[in-house]
Image (cartoon, rainbow, N blue to C red):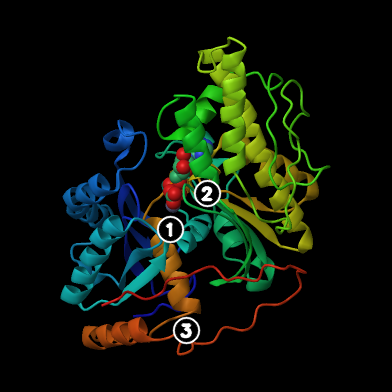
């Protein structure tokens, strides 16, 4: 197996499986970037009646769906047998334990039966690499507003998009990554492939979680992100104002306060300025709703709910873009936004506007790669194996399995040491992304 030809030949094809939450997904990706197939079986309808993901239901549904999804992904990529591939990749965390187990067990079985190496992938690293993917028949990652201007059948990967994303390390890095999903909100400095420094993270709720919870308060439906976005389309941006938690004055992407009177800037409480906090914003929405009810206004009435959704979305986007903009001032070569919330239209527009103004390349995945999918897992597996391998590749499956066992038992000290991250940001948060890179056997 050759996993070191970043963009060259021969082609390295990886089958990836993703079952960390409520999407059962499988994909085949060539050379870490070229999507040959990408299947996602969504469980949204199943969980809608609970207003959120019901973990036990999610894992049982993964069991029912996974085989078909993998078979479809292989067929779409014209792969007759798993043995034709070069590796199997699987999300092994973070996520719901029962859901992860379904994907991990199938991947282990496939790797065992085929003799292919098994590459465990951190879900967040997958989201990061969604920005490196392209397809022949689907819009290229990084093309201007690809998800909104093209449906899944439209668009094509341009050579320039390929070239741009395949640029040399010095052209691409350091890159600033904003991960915004249902479970995470993190600002990460990517110093090279698979080399990260965590700049800031949420102290409580993730951005997507806040969208989901506020949508539930307003009874707008599930999942909350798209529901808030849809409601906000008919909202009045001037009726309410909500606070921008952990921000400092002077950074605004949206209009200033009008009617509602909570403090605009919440105190930072000694926390680092690249950290986030969204649970107070959710409480601010609840307080606003209570205040309106006391005044005799139904907070869930369609127009009022739309106005609150607008204020909430503006506050979240303001915080996300403001902090990303601040962090980007430290000499990064590009900015990438990823994770389910990166599908948000206002966030994409506000970020585009800001980074176009200062002339910094901004990449957002096309909409179909923002939420959970397996193509991003295959991409991350390819780059991790190419740039930070945890085991040696070998032509025989037995050795691969031995390698995988060794990797599973390795302590962080046994793994190949990475060059020390440069200290050019004067930060007081130096944690690494918690990359779980071994499967317990
Ligand atoms: O990345 P993802 O699919 O799953 C996790 O890894 O968590 O993200 C799901 C999250 C949910 O909270 C959902 O409400 C949010 O992404 N989301 C959105 C939008 N589409 C999905 N949030 C805001 N605007 C959207 N258009
Ligand atoms: Zn995700």
Name the mark on residue 376.
1
Vertical placement of residue 285 versus 158, above or below = above
Q: In which quarter of the image is residue 438?
A: bottom left
Q: Looking at this rendering, what residue extends furthest in the right direction?
A: 250
Query: In x, y percent, where is residue 417?
Result: 54, 87
Q: Looking at this rendering, what residue extends furthest in the front direction?
A: 294
Going from N to C along the chain, the mark reached first, 2 or 1, is: 2
**3D distance between C-alphas at marks 3 and 1:** 24 Å
Identify the residue under disc 3. Answer: 412
Mark 2 closeness class: few <14, some 14–19, many ≥20 residues within 10 Å: many
**Which quadrant, please, contains the C terminus?**
bottom left
Going from N to C along the chain, the mark reached first, 2 or 3, is: 2
| Front residue of 209 and 91 | 209
Vertical placement of residue 91 versus 286, above or below = below
Query: In x, y percent, where is residue 176?
Result: 65, 60
Vertical placement of residue 243 versus 379, above or below = above
Q: Are marks 2 and 1 in contact (CB under 8 Å)?
A: yes
Of badges 3 and 1, nearer the viewer stands 3
């Amino acid at each position: 197996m050759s996993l070191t030809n970043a963009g060259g030949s021969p082609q390295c094809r990886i089958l990836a499986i993703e079952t960390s939450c409520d999407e059962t997904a499988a994909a085949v990706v060539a050379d870490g970037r070229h999507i040959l197939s990408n299947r996602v079986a969504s469980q949204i309808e199943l969980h809608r009646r609970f207003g959120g993901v019901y973990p036990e239901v999610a894992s049982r549904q993964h069991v029912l769906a996974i085989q078909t999804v993998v078979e479809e992904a292989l067929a779409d990529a014209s792969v007759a047998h798993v043995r034709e591939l070069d590796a199997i990749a699987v999300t092994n965390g973070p996520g719901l334990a029962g859901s992860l187990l379904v994907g991990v067990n199938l991947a282990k079985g496939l790797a065992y039966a085929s003799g292919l190496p098994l590459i465990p992938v951190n879900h967040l690293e997958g989201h990061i690499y969604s920005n490196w993917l392209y397809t022949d028949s689907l819009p290229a990652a990084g093309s201007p507003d690809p998800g909104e201007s093209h449906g899944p059948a439209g668009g094509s990967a341009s050579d320039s998009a390929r070239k741009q994303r395949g640029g040399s390390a010095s052209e691409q890095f350091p890159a600033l990554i904003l991960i915004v999903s249902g479970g995470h909100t993190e600002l990460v400095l990517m110093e090279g492939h698979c080399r990260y420094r965590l700049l800031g993270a949420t102290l409580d709720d993730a951005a997507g979680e806040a969208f989901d919870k506020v949508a539930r308060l307003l009874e707008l439906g599930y999942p909350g992100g798209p529901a808030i976005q849809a409601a906000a389309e008919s909202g009045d941006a001037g009726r309410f104002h909500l606070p921008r938690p952990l921000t400092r004055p002077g950074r605004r992407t949206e209009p200033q306060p009008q009617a509602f009177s909570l403090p605009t800037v919440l105190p930072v409480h000694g926390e680092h300025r690249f950290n986030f906090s969204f649970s107070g914003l959710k409480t601010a929405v609840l307080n606003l709703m209570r205040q309106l009810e006391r005044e005799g206004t139904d907070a869930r009435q369609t127009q009022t709910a739309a106005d609150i959704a607008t204020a909430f979305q503006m506050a979240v986007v303001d915080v996300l873009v403001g902090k990303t903009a601040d962090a980007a001032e430290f000499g990064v070569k590009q900015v990438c936004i990823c994770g389910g919330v990166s599908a948000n239209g206002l966030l994409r527009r506000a970020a585009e506007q800001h980074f176009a103004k200062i002339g910094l390349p901004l990449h957002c995945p096309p909409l179909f790669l923002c939420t959970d999918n397996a193509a991003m897992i295959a991409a991350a597996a390819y780059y991790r194996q190419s740039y930070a391998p945890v085991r040696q590749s070998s032509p025989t499956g037995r050795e691969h399995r031995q390698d995988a066992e060794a990797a599973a038992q390795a302590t962080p000290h046994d793994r190949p040491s990475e060059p020390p991250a440069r200290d050019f940001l004067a930060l007081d948060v130096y944690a690494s992304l918690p990359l779980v890179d071994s499967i317990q056997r």
